[in-house]
Image (spheres, rainbow, N blue to C red):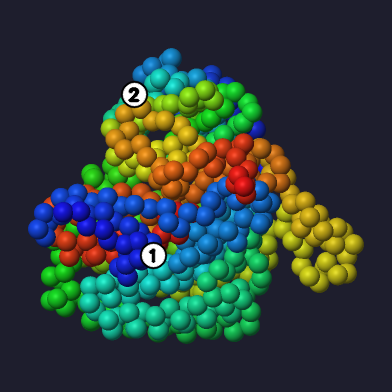
Amino acid sequence: MAWPRAIVDLEELKAHPTVAGLLAWNRAAVTGVKFDRDEMTVCIDRSHIREACTWLRASAECDFNFLSDITCVDWYPAEPRFEVVYHLLSIAKKERVRLKVKLDSAGPAIDSLTTIWPGANYFEREIFDLFGIRFNGHPYLRRLLMPEDWEGYPLRKDYPVEGYR
Amino acid sequence: MILNMGPQHPSTHGVLRVLLEIDGETIVRLMPDIGFLHTGIEKTCEAKFYQQVVPLTDRIDYLCPMTNNLCYVLAVEKLLGLEIPPKAQWMRVLMNELTRINSHLVWLGTHALDLGAMTVFLYCFREREEILKIFEMISGQRMMTSYFRIGGLALPPPLGFFERVRDFVGRFPSRVDEYENLLTGNPIWMMRTKGVARITAEDAIALGASGPTLRGSGVDFDLRRDMPYSSYEKFQFKVPVATEGDVFSRYMCRVRELRESNAIVKQALEGMPEGPIKADAPGIVLPDREKMKTQMEALIYHFKIITEGFAVPPGEVYQAVESPRGEMGYYIVSDGTAKPYRVHMRAACLANLQALPKMCEGGLLADVVAAIGSIDIVLGEIDR
């Protein structure tokens, strides 16, 4: 069973309820879409992520009330270097959507989602700890897993696997 | 007053440090401090071939190795678009549910021990020992099994395996009765757990809690039933839900899950299909030893898989399974090479732990131990 080709054309995916909802809400916030391997990905403009999540959570037709996960991917040396990835789940509709925000390598920062889901707290702290991305409005942005005085961000691609010796 | 609990404390189930601000016996503020077990598994994965990551997944959550194996191999199989034969899928369900029983038994034993009921611990570990022997029989390992592989299973089940599991499944419900006799109606147990460490459904959802921690607050959601994987849709089972949101509710959810898991194992035994245990994908699945020693082509595939792995088409997937603790998810990004570009584990415990302050603040100091036990944390999974 080979997967069909990934769909990245916005016109083809306009009918998807989540995409349609987001487009109707704010066309400028959506910078790209991808439907691949049965999973929906929506790229969101960096300045709109908090409003987009607020809307996705509140709207009756989407109802993404559960924040499954936040993580990050480092595409070093490409620019924009970082991709912050959000996985939302609708408990009532049993559906998932993935949101992506691209960030440049110079002083990467993005709005925190802790005001919408307090559960975003640890996920964002983990990304701050391991990737060095700042979350604006986070209540307690400190290292989570590494020691407080650790230098560098271990999950970045320019950080060696065995660490600096 | 600020009180330090842990990291070395018998009731923190590993190395969890909890900072407690107390006023007399009342908790004013609670702050978990984690990271003592951080081993950088996500980073290590990026330097390994896809098949070499399987043994690492065991070590994340050492109480449910098979669930982690399952979640990882499902994610890679989804990336590859592999079709898994029915027998392998059913075996995966069977082993996965035995793992759930195993994990819940450790939880029940240690949770009861924390609250002063010592006998239950010994009873639980008696049954757990039998499950570990079953694991050893099928995979050669008691705990770090690595039994599920990309494309199927490592080995066919040995002779006498199904009889042994059937024997265990027949005996187990009466053993759950024993635990319940000791705890469920016990006045001391009820006083320690009822109305303690409450959390509402809204708070649990907002904090990202999943699994029994969420269902104990009355949210009827289980990934096995609601977003099925690995042929769970072919099994009949109930999802236990309790409404109070206290320690007792979470206890009841898990104890009833023990019985449901046992019923699933029984169904898997009865309806076990015949057929191969590995997918037909020569470049990805290792050939049988027999073929490898008699056929040139099989030998070449074997050599290539071991030395240079196999390329996975570029893309990304998020695969979640219902682990004994909640939503265990793997997010894997492939750049088209034989090593994953990024592997991220969504640990159920990490999110569940965030519910701890909400449960404990305003409560009594002695109830912190009950609350920590009731969210069933495994620090290996939290710290990764």
Q: Position of residue A129 (x, y in %)?
A: 45, 40
What is the total number of numbered labels drawn onto the structure image? Answer: 2
Q: Position of residue B27 (x, y in %)?
A: 15, 54
Task: Using the image, name the chain to which the residue with label 1 belongs.
Answer: B
Residue at the image position 42 percent from the left and 30 percent from the top: A134
Q: Quick one: A39 or B371, which is closer to the camera?
A: B371
Q: Is residue B178 left or right of residue B308?
A: left
Q: Residue furthest right?
A: B296
Q: Residues within 10 Å of mark 1 (few under 14, many from 20)?
A: some
Q: Amino acid at mark 1?
A: Gly
Question: What label does residue B366 carry, if any?
Answer: none
Task: Using the image, name the chain to which the residue with label 2 belongs.
Answer: A
Vertical order, A36 against B262 (above or below): above
Between the residue at mark 1 and the residue at mark 2, the CA separation in whole angstroms equals 39 Å
Q: Quick one: B171 or B345, which is closer to the camera?
A: B345
Residue indicated by mark 2: A51
Residue indicated by mark 1: B14
Q: Is residue B368 left or right of residue A96?
A: left
Residue at the image position 52 percent from the left and 55 percent from the top: B39
Q: Position of residue B169 (x, y in %)?
A: 43, 79
Vertical order, B115 against B123 (above or below): above
Q: Amino acid at mark 2?
A: Glu
Vertical order, B220 against B105 (above or below): above
Examine the image and state in which quarter residue B326 appears.
bottom left
Any part of residue B348 in sight: no
